Amino acid sequence: MKELIDIIEIIARALVDEPSVVSVKEIGGGHTSIVELRVAKTDLGKIIGKQGRTADALRIILSAVSAKINRHAVLDIVE
């Protein structure tokens, strides 16, 4: 699961104005995990994007990486 956390963290840090505030952690286990992404309140719009497109793209990338390691992961964006 380290791969999932690393990918999301790298992308999120590149998108926001305050990369030092970005934190990603995994909740759960088994076959399904929740990847929790926390950013600064001012950067929340950049992570969500217009009409949620950036958030959807992050979820698609997460799905692709998790499928490669035979797991299921869900992205939860927290302010």
Image (cartoon, rainbow, N blue to C red):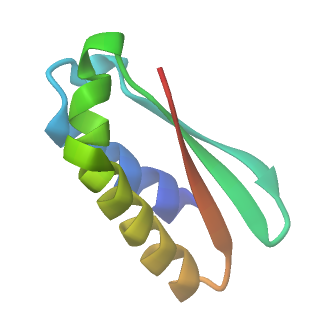
- Residue 52 in view of the camera: yes
- Residue 11 in view of the camera: no
x 38%, y 51%: residue:
8
Image quarter (top left, top right, bottom left or bottom right) of the N terminus: bottom right
Picture quadrant where residue 30 is located: bottom right
- On screen, residue 31 versus residue 35, left or right, reads right
Note whether 62 is above or below 58 in the view shown: below
- On screen, residue 61 versus residue 35, left or right, reads left
Picture quadrant where residue 36 is located: top right
Residue found at the far top of this picture: 41
Note whether 43 is above or below 7 in the view shown: above
- On screen, residue 10 versus residue 72, left or right, reads left
x 54%, y 58%: residue:
2
Picture quadrant where residue 7 is located: bottom left
Note whether 68 is above or below 31 in the view shown: below
Find residue 13 and report its horizontal and vertical position in percent: 24, 36
Marks counted in the figure total 0
Question: Which one is in front, 48 or 29?
Answer: 48
Residue found at the far front of this picture: 51
Find residue 71 and report its horizontal and vertical position in percent: 68, 77
x 31%, y 39%: residue:
48
Note whether 45 is above or below 37 in the view shown: above
Find residue 64 and report its horizontal and vertical position in percent: 44, 79
